[in-house]
Amino acid sequence: MDWFNLCFPLFMILSPAVFSLFIKKVPANDADKGAQESKIDRLRTRLWFWTTIAVIVFAACYLWLPRELTRQMWVLFFPLWFVCVMPLLQAKDRGWGPIHVPEGTRSASLAPRDRVSPVPGWTWGLALAVWLVGIAILVWLLARQSAQGQGWWVGFFAFFGGPFWLAGGYLGVRMFLVEAEPIDPGASQELADAYEEFRRFKAWMVYGLSCAAMLLFLSVSLLLALGPQYEMIAIWIGAGGGSLLGILGGVFGTYGSIRRARLARLLMDLREEAQR
């Protein structure tokens, strides 16, 4: 796993600077373009300077420190992101900044959105039915093995893993549906439609990830229950599938942040237009 000690921390250290390259500059309506360009150049230089320093520090640690300590250098991601990248993103596009809601202004719709989820109830029932079928097969396999070795531990893990992920996904969808959404003075239909589409994206994203996690845990448990000859396959599927889910979660989260910034910028534009 020496390649992991090298690649993972380096990937995390470089990812903030690389991500900033994909965010396009959106001129602010009330800002001087020359001042904005100057600020962006200054923040971009600061970001790449500290990213270079972080890479040099990591390289020194990789050469002279134990691998266990080197692996932890990925935490340099956080100061690079919050101290260097976020100010740069806000300078490029004000949608990445905080949304200021004037006092006394109602935020979000009053409609009970938690009762009209984009994810139909039958889809959760289908996921639960798949898990129950998998558990029935797992119990049958464990019974054939007379519950020796770690069989019942595998069954216990799979039994509680399914409800945990499905319940977490269900609660996550409800939480996103009732999230406050600022509205513009003119109650723009364009903004309302954009928020509705964003809610649908987040709901299906959480549903898909929770079901995929449930299937992953169940599949690994079934392979382990089949016998020792499937242990390595189960390990590779568990490690590879878990890594893939983590990557997908990061990709969806990043894309969601980009869409949220677009919504914030649209809200600010509509408010300024209403004030003219």
Image: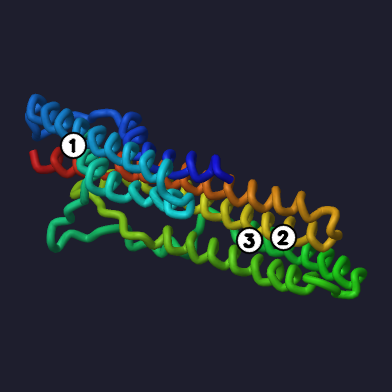
- The answer to whether residue 112 is left or right of residue 105 is right
Pointer 2 or 3: first along the chain? 3
- Residue for badge 3: 124
Residue kind at label 1, given as amino acid type: Ala
C-alpha separation, residue under disc 2 versus residue under disc 3:
16 Å
Pointer 3 or 1: first along the chain? 1
Between 261 and 220, the one lying in front of the other is 220
Residue shown at 92%/69% (left/top)? 144
Question: How far across and down, in percent of the image, does residue 152 sit?
Answer: 78, 74
Question: How far across and down, in percent of the image, does residue 95 sit?
Answer: 24, 41
Residue shown at 78%/67% (left/top)? 135
- Which secondary structure, mark 1? helix
Q: Residue furthest top?
A: 34
Q: Residue furthest front?
A: 64
- Which secondary structure, mark 3? helix
Q: Is residue 199 above or below residue 265?
A: below
Using a 10 Å C-alpha cutoff, classify the residue at mark 2 as few (fewer than 14 neighbours), some (14 to 19) or many (20 or more).
Answer: many
Give the mark count.
3
